[in-house]
Image (tube, rainbow, N blue to C red):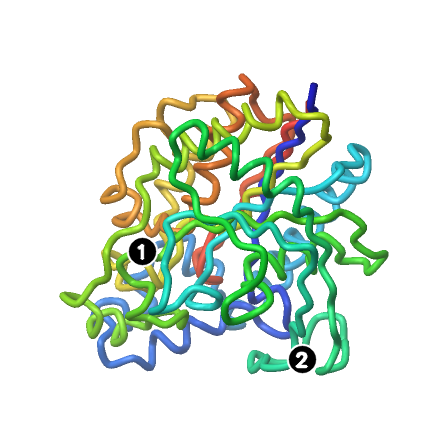
């Protein structure tokens, strides 16, 4: 019988570079489409004003960055204690490998390996490790594990896509950043990875072309949406089926959901300036309590209203943990009004 470890992490791009991670607030303030009331700090929620402070968010940036690093170190310790044969990572592809020529709702990337250069086209700033721009990172895959999962899901009636080689790039940043951050101290990452893509951006995938929408950009894509992404309850179902597939396998497998929670640039009701922290806290408490019905009964329209697009990756993990009848052994909520999103780390041990 197989053994399964569950982990929840983030692949927040801002962590990969040095400097203030709250810089997006200034972009919003300079955007002519920002709702006028939000131009005045006095109209911001109190907690948001407190985090912005008198230093334009620098103290919060430093604290939030360190809290994320601590979360990744705890997740890595759980991985090393478990020693998985490979990792399944649920992440979103943001117009990276999947573009106009193919957009699957879900896909399993059963690669032998992926070679990436994470800093080659980086325009965000100096990376957090001062690594050379031409650094090459090889991420080992596990083709047999990917084939096993695709076969199991197809046999259960899930029309899953799979691939043995990439279309446009080696791997999307959701997967690359997950590996980079889980190896924060650069001791090496010895665990093969099976990326499991979720079309989290759905209606806005091609319209945004992977660029986080500002208030102005958000207006420009309205009315010309793409077809939607998968329903959260379907992600929940596919996560449960993934747990069944490996519970009866010979492997030790780590299931990893990778994303931040509500994103400010996807939360139109807040002017695309700050996230839906109230909803994030509600889902976090449900996660911590093992209240899986709250997760199971969510519609896509509800998720999109809350900026929970990327949380679809966590819905897969939630379905898997519900199937295994687990609650997290560790869970931490990192609240941030000004760095674009809240972050959550969770560990579900066997």
Q: Residues within 10 Å of mark 2 (few under 14, many from 20)?
A: some
Q: Is residue 95 above or below residue 106?
A: below
Tell me the distance, in whole angstroms, between the alpha carbons under discs 1 and 2: 31 Å
Residue 126 numbered mark, or none? 2
- The quadrant holding residue 59 is bottom right
The answer to whether one can see residue 335 in this image is no
Q: Residue 85: x percent and y percent?
A: 76, 38
Q: Nearer the viewer, residue 313 or 227?
A: 227
Indicate which disc, 1 or 2, sits on the residue closer to the N terminus: 2
Answer left or right for 144 relative to 35. Answer: right
Q: Is residue 133 above or below residue 56?
A: below
Taking the spot 64% from the left edge, 53% from the top edge, the residue there is 68
Q: Is residue 94 visible?
A: yes
- Which residue bears the numbered disc 1? 202
Residue 246 point in image, percent of width and height: 61, 28
Foreground residue among 339 and 84: 84
């Amino acid at each position: 019988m197989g053994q399964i470890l569950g982990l929840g992490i983030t692949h927040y791009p801002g962590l990969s570079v040095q400097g203030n991670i709250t810089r997006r607030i200034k972009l919003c303030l300079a955007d002519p489409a920002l709702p006028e009331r939000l131009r005045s700090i006095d109209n911001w929620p109190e907690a948001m004003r407190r985090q912005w402070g008198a230093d334009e968010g620098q103290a919060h940036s430093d604290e939030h960055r360190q809290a994320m690093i601590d979360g990744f170190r705890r997740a890595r310790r759980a991985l090393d204690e478990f020693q998985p044969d490979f990792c399944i990572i649920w992440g979103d592809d943001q117009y990276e490998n999947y573009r106009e020529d193919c957009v699957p709702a879900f896909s399993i990337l059963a690669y032998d390996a992926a070679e990436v250069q994470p800093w080659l086209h980086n325009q965000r700033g100096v990376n957090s490790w001062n690594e050379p721009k031409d650094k090459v990172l090889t991420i080992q895959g596990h083709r047999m594990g990917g084939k096993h999962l695709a076969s199991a899901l197809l046999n259960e009636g899930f029309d899953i896509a799979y691939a043995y080689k990439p279309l446009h790039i080696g791997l999307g940043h959701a997967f690359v950043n997950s590996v980079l951050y889980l190896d924060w101290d650069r001791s090496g990452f010895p665990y093969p990875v099976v990326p499991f893509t979720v079309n989290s951006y759905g209606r806005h995938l091609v319209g945004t072309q992977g660029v986080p929408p500002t208030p102005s950009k958000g207006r420009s894509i309205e009315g010309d949406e793409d077809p939607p992404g998968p329903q959260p309850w379907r992600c929940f179902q596919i996560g449960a089926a993934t747990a069944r597939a490996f519970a009866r396998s010979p492997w030790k497998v780590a299931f990893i959901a990778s994303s931040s929670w509500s994103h400010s640039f996807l939360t139109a009701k807040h002017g695309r300036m700050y996230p839906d922290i109230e909803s994030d806290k509600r889902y976090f408490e449900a996660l911590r309590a093992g209240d899986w019905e709250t997760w199971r009964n969510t519609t896509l329209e509800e998720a999109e209203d809350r900026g929970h697009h990327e949380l679809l990756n966590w819905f897969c993990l939630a379905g898997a943990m519900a199937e295994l009848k687990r609650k997290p052994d560790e869970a931490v909520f990192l609240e941030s009004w000004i760095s674009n999103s809240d972050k959550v780390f969770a560990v579900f041990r066997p």
